[in-house]
């Protein structure tokens, strides 16, 4: 919902395609810069608290978007600065939340729990943008207010989750500990290849940031059209995952044994 509102509002404000690309960039840069730190934070502190604080930070940033919109002082630079804060909050939230899930269920149920989390996220990527496009008819401030309220609810729900934190010694934070995750990945070619592929997909697959241009200038729709365009990739991914779950790839997969001619 927030992505649709920010993209549409910024494009209406500036009409510049470069600004739409900067939205993704200012969210991506904090993730890269904070990567050596966020893993250590997730390992050394209560992950529930980390996730809850990140949700509160996102609620505050979203409230700033709403107040700036209502007050008329929110400009291009203000939007990009607030989006950068949202990116930094998510940089801390994602590893802490991912590490928290396996601790909440028995080991035998971890695959089902992770599948449920992924399914819920995919459903949100379908419903959220479409709903955000419809609610934008009430104004961007209305979308931001709803997103901020949901962030506060999420923080409260995470805070009441019962998680017995294991007793473990607090290691001193050193340069080696900060980059231990990077060293671990570099030593394992399979992980390095998979993460590199995903990284390039994130860097080069940001064409979805330009969807406000397609929605308004090419298709002649409003923010509701942008919401549907944003929801379409997630809908396609969900449909394909369901198909592969029912009919997995069983032929022609894996390394080819035939020599090239």
Image (cartoon, helix red, strand yellow):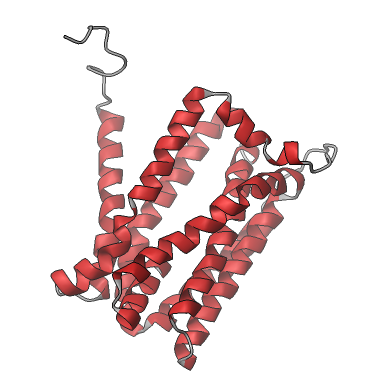
One can see residue 160 in this view = no
Left or right, 244 with respect to 66, comes to left
- x and y, in percent, of residue 8 in the image: 32, 74
Q: Residue furthest left?
A: 219
Quadrant placement of the C terminus: top left
- x and y, in percent, of residue 87 in the image: 53, 61
Identify the residue shown where x is 79% and y is 41%.
174
One can see residue 229 in this view = yes
Left or right, 187 with respect to 173, comes to left
Q: Quadrant of residue 5?
A: bottom left
Q: Quadrant of residue 107?
A: top right
Relative depth, front residue between 168 and 196: 196
Relative depth, front residue between 120 and 46: 46
Identify the residue shown where x is 60% and y is 46%.
95
Left or right, 75 with respect to 36, comes to left
- x and y, in percent, of residue 251 in the image: 22, 17
Left or right, 174 with respect to 113, comes to right
Q: In the image, is residue 96 above or below residue 70?
A: above
Q: In the image, is residue 242 above or below residue 67?
A: above
Quadrant placement of the N terminus: bottom left
Identify the residue shown where x is 43% and y is 42%.
199
Identify the residue shown where x is 40% and y is 36%.
197
Relative depth, front residue between 123 and 5: 5
- x and y, in percent, of residue 103 in the image: 65, 39
Q: In the image, is residue 217 above or below residue 198?
A: below
Q: In the image, is residue 102 above or below residue 66?
A: above
* Label tally: 0
């Amino acid at each position: 919902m927030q992505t649709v509102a920010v993209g549409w509002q910024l494009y209406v404000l500036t009409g510049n395609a470069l600004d739409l690309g900067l939205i993704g960039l200012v969210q991506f840069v904090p993730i890269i810069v904070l990567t050596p730190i966020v893993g250590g934070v997730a390992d050394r502190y209560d992950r529930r608290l980390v996730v809850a604080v990140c949700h509160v930070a996102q609620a505050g940033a979203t409230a700033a978007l709403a107040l700036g919109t209502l007050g008329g002082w929110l400009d291009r630079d203000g939007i990009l600065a607030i989006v950068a804060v949202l990116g930094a909050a998510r940089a801390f939230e994602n590893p802490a939340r991912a590490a928290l899930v396996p601790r909440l269920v028995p080991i035998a149920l971890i695959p089902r729990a992770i599948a449920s989390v992924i399914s819920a996220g995919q459903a949100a990527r379908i419903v959220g943008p479409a709903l955000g496009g419809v609610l934008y008819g009430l104004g961007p401030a209305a979308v931001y207010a709803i997103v901020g309220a949901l962030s506060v609810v999420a923080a409260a729900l995470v805070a009441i989750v019962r998680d017995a934190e294991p007793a473990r010694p607090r290691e001193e934070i050193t340069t080696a500990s900060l980059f231990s995750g990077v060293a671990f990945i570099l030593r394992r070619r399979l992980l390095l290849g998979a993460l590199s592929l995903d990284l390039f997909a994130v860097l080069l697959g940001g064409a979805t940031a330009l969807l406000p241009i397609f929605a308004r200038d090419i298709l002649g729709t409003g923010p509701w059209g942008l919401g549907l365009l944003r929801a379409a990739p997630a809908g396609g991914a969900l449909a394909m995952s369901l198909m592969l779950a029912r009919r997995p790839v069983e032929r022609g997969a894996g390394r080819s044994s035939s020599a090239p001619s």
